[in-house]
Amino acid sequence: MQNPKTISPIERQVMASVGAVYFARTLTGTTALKVYAFILSMWVVGRLVWVSKVFANFVEVEKGGLSAMSNFVLAAFEHTHLGVQIALLVAGVAFVSLAVEAVRKLSQPAHSYSF
C-alpha cells in the first residue's frame, strides 16, 4: 500500500487541474463579473468627469436642502455625456446586484453538514 503522504504524479496533475478550474471559475463567476463591471464603470466615470468639481459643487448645493440636492443630481446626470450616463447606470445596476446578493447570502442560515 502506498504511503498516504506521498502523492503520485497523476494525483498531482489531477489536483493541479482541479485547482486551475476552480481558480478560473472564481475569476469568471457572476459575482466577480459584477465587481469587474462596477470597478470598470466607476473608473470610466472618473476618467470622463472632473469628480472633485462635482463634489465641490454638491457641497454648495447641499446647503439648500433635499430638494436642491435632488435637482442638482438630476441636472448633473441629465447634462453629462451619454458615456457617463451609461457608465453610471452600469455602476448602479452592478452595485444594487452586489448588495442584493450580499443580503441574500447573509440572510441564509449557515450550512451544517451532518453525516
Image (spheres, rainbow, N blue to C red):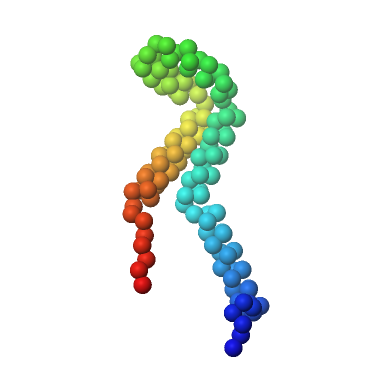
Is 8 left, or right, of 79 in this rendering?
A: right
Query: Nearest the camera: 50 or 82?
Result: 50
Tally of marks = 0
Q: Pick the residue in front: 85 or 28.
A: 28
- Identify the residue at horizontal 45%, vertical 41% (top origin): 94
Relative to residue 62, is residue 13 depicted above or below?
below
Q: Is residue 92 above or below residue 36?
A: above
Is 48 rendered above or below residue 72?
Answer: below
Image-quadrant location for residue 78:
top left
Percent x, y of residue 77 = 45, 24
Q: Residue furthest bottom?
A: 1
Q: Point out residue 13 in the picture as x, y percentages from the top left corner.
A: 63, 73
* Residue 94 appears left or right of 36: left
The residue at the point 35 percent across, 68 percent down is 114
Residue 86 visible in rendering:
no
86 and 15: which is toward the camera: 15
Picture residue at 37% right of the left edge, 14% below the top: 65
Q: Residue at x 36, y 62 (%)?
A: 112
Find residue 37 and report its horizontal and vertical position in percent.
51, 42
Q: Which of 86 and 104 is in front in this view?
A: 104
Residue lying furthest right in this view? 9
Quadrant showing the C terminus = bottom left
In this rendering, the answer to whether 14 lies above or below 70 is below
Dividing the picture into quadrants, the one containing residue 12 is bottom right
Q: Can residue 114 be seen in this view?
A: yes
Q: Please state, as top left, top right, bottom left or bottom right, where the N terminus lies in the image.
A: bottom right
